[in-house]
Amino acid sequence: MLKIAVLVSGGGTNLQAIIDGIKNGDITNTEITAVISNNANAYALTRAKDNGIKAMCISPKDYSSRDIFNQALLDEVNKLDVDLIVLAGYLVRIPEAMVHQYSHRIINIHPSLIPSFCGVGFYGLKVHEAALEKGVKVTGATVHYVDEGMDTGEIIFQKAVDVLPDDTPETLQRRVMEQAEWKLLPAAINMIANRQNI
């Protein structure tokens, strides 16, 4: 059984896709041990509680320095004894110590076809705004392992999504979620759970 911790910052739509995937059998041999957010008001924490999953807030704002926060986050994750850490819209940089300790055991979903529109500053609607400004005809999403860089780890899955002429950042974001993110992340977790190649 693959035990996972899901780290989120906002609404938790990708978390919901994982929860639904486990319930409907698209993801097997997997259980969510805990959901951790840096934002006490994140709706993702409500989603976790509503599904009987341990929900925790560990926020940098509650610590006197980033180093102390980083250690607290790592300590809490270590206590959970999980096999895989899933970043599902988590807007905090993962501590380097955690990246090293959990090498090839942290995955992230990013709303573009890496290496396009990724790295520092590219998150949420900003990714889709940049794609529209550039005039690309195709965008998508990427699931990748997390390394020391920002969106630079080994790619697991990518899925392309068409950009339509009348798209706004909001409509494009929704299509990328529905057609790519909510499919790719559960598929990646299922693959890892059943191949145990982490």
Image (spheres, grey):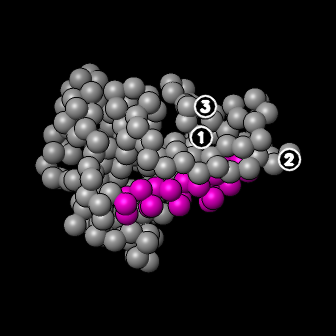
The range drawn in magenta is 171-191
Give the mark nearer the N terminus: 1 vs 3: 1
Q: Which residue is mark 1?
A: 112
Work out how far the residue at label 2 is from the one at label 3, CA to CA, in angstroms.
Answer: 20 Å
Say the numbered circle drawn on residue 1: none
Between disc 2 and disc 3, the foreground one is 3
State if disc 3 and disc 1 touch (CB < 8 Å).
Answer: yes
Q: Residue at x 29, y 42 (%)?
A: 104
Q: Identity of the amino acid at label 2?
A: Asp
| Membership of 28 in magenta stretch | no
Q: Residue 166 shows which numbered tag?
A: 2
Distance (Cα) linking label 1 and label 2: 19 Å
Please state if 88 lies on the left or on the right of 97 as rendered. Answer: right
In the rendered image, which residue does mark 3 sit on? 117
Look at the image and tell me in which quarter the N terminus lies: bottom left
Q: Position of residue 194 (x, y in %)?
A: 30, 65
- The three-letter amino acid code for the residue at tag 1 is Ser
> Residue 117, located in which quarter of the rendered image?
top right
Principal SS element in the magenta part?
helix
Figure disc tally: 3
Q: Nearer the viewer, residue 181 or 38?
A: 181
Say above or below: 141 vs 28: above
